[in-house]
């Protein structure tokens, strides 16, 4: 991962809503390819997303974002861009696999606006919103935690990462991407669900995530 996350202030607040924008980066085959990659038949995967959880609440992470891939077949590289969502649950089989968002075209250079809102503490309902600012298309949907685990809201994050293969044990090679910059990073917290929310001042408690 690389990006940033924040924890809520004051305690014991928990995050109930967050948002962010980014421009879909252009993925390319790395100029210096990682050891073990095949120049004629390889996949390079990266993801850009926002999420509630994932740092201090390790068992629950609703997230939404875009994939930026490069698929190399017979030496020919083809970029693949798509929007996706998932609700990651620690140690639950299949919950690390992202779900494509249908009927939502996204291209390199498009500006994406996304948000997540906790709408019920149990069974952990969250509203997912994603909008392509260039086409004007907006997709909204609500889902409950697939494992009955509520979103803990102890952190929110804005992340660009190297993706994991469907097996969950091996990571794809990381493509070279144009710079990823998150803007309009907003987060609201409250002591309990249904109570008035306060806007987090991100400079107060932000932590950077540096990709190794």
Image: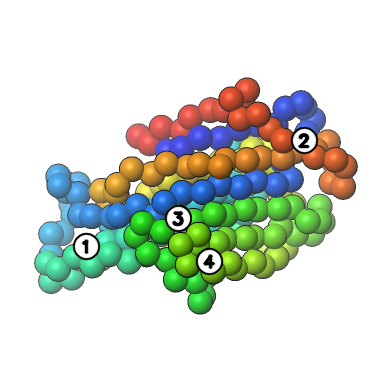
Q: Residue at x 32, y 66 (%)?
A: 80
Q: CA distance from mark 3 to mark 1?
A: 28 Å
Residue reaching furthest to the bottom: 103
Mark 4 or mark 3, earlier in chain: 3
Mark drawn on residue 109: none
Callout in the foreground (1, 4) = 4
- Up-down relation of residue 73 to residue 70 (above or below): below
Reading the image, the residue beneath label 1 is: 42
Reading the image, the residue beneath label 2 is: 198
Q: CA distance from mark 3 to mark 2?
A: 27 Å
Q: CA distance from mark 4 to mark 3?
A: 10 Å
Residue reaching furthest to the top: 204
Q: Residue at x 76, y 26 (%)?
A: 10
Q: Residues within 10 Å of mark 3 (few under 14, many from 20)?
A: some
User: Which quarter of the figure is the C terminus placed in?
Assistant: top left
Q: CA distance from mark 4 to mark 2?
A: 29 Å
Q: Where's residue 203, x and y in %? A: 58, 25
Callout in the foreground (3, 1) = 3
Mark drawn on residue 136: 4
Mark 1 or mark 2, earlier in chain: 1
Reading the image, the residue beneath label 3 is: 111
């Amino acid at each position: 991962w690389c990006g940033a996350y924040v924890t809520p202030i004051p305690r014991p607040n928990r995050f109930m809503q967050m948002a962010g924008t980014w421009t879909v980066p252009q993925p390319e085959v790395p100029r210096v390819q990682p050891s073990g990659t095949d120049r004629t038949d390889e996949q390079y995967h990266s993801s850009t997303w926002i999420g509630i959880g994932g740092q201090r609440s390790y068992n629950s992470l609703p997230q939404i974002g875009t994939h930026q891939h490069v698929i190399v077949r017979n030496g020919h590289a083809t970029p693949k861009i798509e929007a996706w969502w998932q609700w990651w649950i620690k140690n639950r089989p299949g919950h690390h696999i992202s779900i494509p968002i249908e009927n939502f075209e996204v291209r390199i250079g498009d500006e994406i606006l996304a948000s997540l809102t906790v709408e019920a503490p149990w069974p952990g309902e969250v509203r997912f919103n994603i909008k392509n600012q260039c086409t004007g298309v907006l997709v909204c949907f609500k889902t409950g935690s697939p494992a009955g685990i509520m979103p803990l809201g102890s952190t929110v994050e804005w992340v660009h990462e190297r993706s994991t293969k469907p097996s969950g044990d091996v990571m794809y090679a990381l493509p070279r991407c144009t710079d990823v910059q998150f803007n309009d990073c907003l987060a609201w917290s409250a002591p309990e669900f249904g109570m008035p929310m306060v806007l987090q001042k991100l400079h107060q408690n932000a932590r950077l995530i540096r990709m190794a």
